[in-house]
Amino acid sequence: MEIQFKMDEKKRGSFFIEQDGRQIAELDFEVKENLLNAYHTGVRPELEGQGIAARLFDRMVLFAREEGYKVIPTCSYILAKFRRRPEEFEDIWYRKEDEPTGEACGIPPK
């Protein structure tokens, strides 16, 4: 399964995987200045538990590092991954008292 990437002119983007002509997984984000707001991760229910979301997460982390972005982990899945190994992500984890806490996963930012 190949991870694909798209980003529109408004800097809303996605890492996603297609299989047999349909999208089966995605990690959606929005970039503003040097911040990448990762707000949704989803995998089709029948494919959960196979590490697909983790592959998308790893690709997003690589992208953030390559582009010099700090990540706002609005998605609860991404926040949980950051919290499990905070030292591994301290270079890209954007933390601020009033930032989203992850409960908003699936709800695009305003």
Image: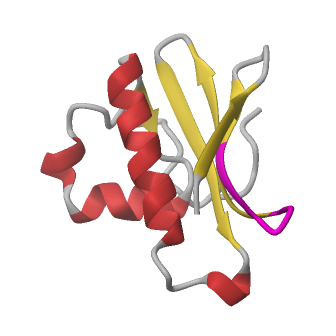
The quarter of the picture where residue 33 lies is top right
Residue at x 35%, y 61% (from the top left corner)? 81
Residue at x 64%, y 83% (from the top left corner)? 47
Q: Residue furthest left?
A: 87
* Place of residue 9 in the rendered image (x, y in percent of width and height, measured from the top left): 79, 14
Majority secondary structure of magenta residues: strand
| Residue range (magenta) | 15-22
Counting labels gives 0
Q: Is residue 45 above or below residue 11?
A: below
Can residue 92 be seen in this snapshot?
yes
Residue at x 41%, y 18% (from the top left corner)? 67
* Place of residue 3 in the rendered image (x, y in percent of width and height, measured from the top left): 58, 50
Residue at x 31%, y 55% (from the top left corner)? 82
| In the image: residue 18, left or right of residue 98 | right
* Place of residue 6 in the rendered image (x, y in percent of width and height, measured from the top left): 70, 33
Can residue 95 be seen in this snapshot?
no
| In the image: residue 67, left or right of residue 30 | left
Q: Residue furthest right?
A: 21
